[in-house]
Amino acid sequence: MNVYLDIDGVLLANDLTPANHSKEFLAYIICKYPNSTYWLTTHCQGDSNVPVQHIGHLFDEETVGIMRKIKPTTWDLAKTRGIDFTQPFIWFDDDLFHEEKLTLLDNEVLDNWIKVDLRENPNQLGLFLDSFPVPVNLLN
């Protein structure tokens, strides 16, 4: 299974503060999906070092090492263009653009988008550790 991660609003609560449980969340994902975790963020366009440079200073050395294992994606205009729809996936992001939502609906995988809302629940990443989401195409 592929796991796609946004940064702003998911791993960061704001520009200068990591989200609650982001360190444990990243460690869990990389432990469980070491070869199939991807950056899907405006901070990564084919270079996985850019997201680490962007947010690494906010995390400890161990977490930065974990971040270095996350693979890059390349996309244009819509993040969904960076998703491999031939593989089961989940995508953690705080918001969708209209085109992204339509693409997920067209591929019948809207439920594979995991909406992260840290304003409503600042401990949401911790809840994912207790009950990790399963992609729709693995439920059948």
Image (cartoon, helix red, strand yellow):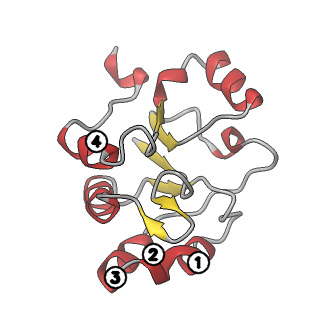
Mark 3 → mark 4, Cα distance in angstroms: 21 Å
Residue position marked by numbered label 4 in the rendering:
128
Q: Which mark is residue 49?
A: 1
The spot of residue 33 in percent (x, y) is 33, 53
Q: Which mark is residue 108?
A: none
The spot of residue 140 in percent (x, y) is 34, 14
Secondary element type, mark 3: loop
Mark 1 → mark 4, Cα distance in angstroms: 26 Å
Disc 1 + disc 4, Cβ < 8 Å:
no
- Tell me which amino acid carries mark 2: Arg
Residue position marked by numbered label 2 in the rendering:
68
Secondary element type, mark 4: helix
Relative height, residue 124 to residue 46 (above, below): above
Placement of the N terminus among the 4 image quadrants: top left
Residue position marked by numbered label 3 in the rendering:
60
The answer to which of 59 and 32 lies nearer the viewer is 59
